[in-house]
Image (cartoon, rainbow, N blue to C red):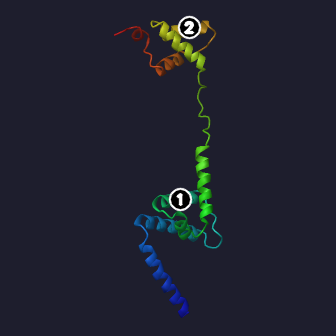
Amino acid sequence: MIYHLLFCIVTLVFDFFASLQVVPHEKDLQIALLRQQLRILERQSKTKPRLSRPEKLILVSLATGLRAQTQRFHEALAEALLLVQPDTLLKWHRQLVRRKWTFQHANRGGRPRLEADIEWLIVRLARENPRLEYDKIQGELLKLGFKVHLRTVKNVLRRHNLLPAPLRGCSS
């Protein structure tokens, strides 16, 4: 019992002297990392802790901050991580980065985009005939076999910074 108490005191003194060499920002990140692990252990005290995705994300972000602060990253991780191995944490980080950069956006809905050749034709008609209004351009497209809404013609011309018919033909 006394030897165990002496051992604890000696390790505490060694830890204190080792912590004097640590930069304050690094020390704060290590403390935050240890506290997060302690919260996980308190939540799951009986069994081996299974980390959820948010918990993994928090641990990875703290470890990434620790990486930016310290030169000896792997040793600092080995000191601060008690629940998982540093390689496991780095594997989670790689998975998160891979998931972020390969994320496919779902179809957002709405009307399908206008085909490029029809859009080019609308812009060409508007530039070559500056007095044609939106409905006249729509009529010309209908004669060519393209059914386009009046609002679509207006949106295409706005997107290409072309003014409405009375202003398009004026030169300053």
Closer to the chain start, of discs 2 and 1, is 1
Question: Image height check: is 94 above or below 29?
Answer: above
Q: SS class of the residue under badge 2?
A: helix
Specify the quadrant of the image occupied by residue 42: bottom right
Image height of 170 relative to 8, above or below: above
The type of residue carrying mark 2 is Gly
Give the x, y percent position of residue 86.
Answer: 59, 64
Residue visible at 61% across and 43% down in the picture? 103
Instruction: Count how many numbered circles sit on residues in the image.
Output: 2
Q: Is residue 51 something one can see in this rendering? A: no
Q: Nearer the viewer, mark 2 or mark 1?
A: 1
* Percent position of residue 47, x then y: 66, 71
Who is closer to the viewer here, 46 or 70? 70
Measured as percent of width and height from the top left, residue 12 is found at 48, 81
Determine the residue located farthest toward the right in the rendered image.
47
Residue located beneath label 1 in the image: 58
> In the displayed structure, would residue 33 be above or below residue 17?
above
Q: Is there a contact, CB below 8 Å, between mark 2 and mark 1?
A: no
Which residue is outermost to the bottom?
2
Please identify the quadrant where the C terminus is shown. top left
**Location of residue 2 in the rendering, given as x and y in whole percent from the top left corner:** 53, 93
Outermost residue, left side: 172
Q: How would you rate the neighbour count of disc 1 (Cα within 10 Å): few for under 14, some for 14-19, many for 20 or more?
A: some
Residue appearing at x 50%, y 82% in the figure: 11
Residue 100, can we see it? yes
Residue 101, image quadrant = top right
Q: Residue at x 54, y 13 (%)?
A: 122
Residues 95 and 53: in front is 95
Task: Sort mark 2 into few (<14), some (14-19) or many (20+) by Cα contacts within 10 Å.
Answer: some
**Residue at 48% from the left image edge and 10% from the top image edge:** 127
Residue underneath mark 2: 139
Q: Secondary structure under badge 1?
A: helix
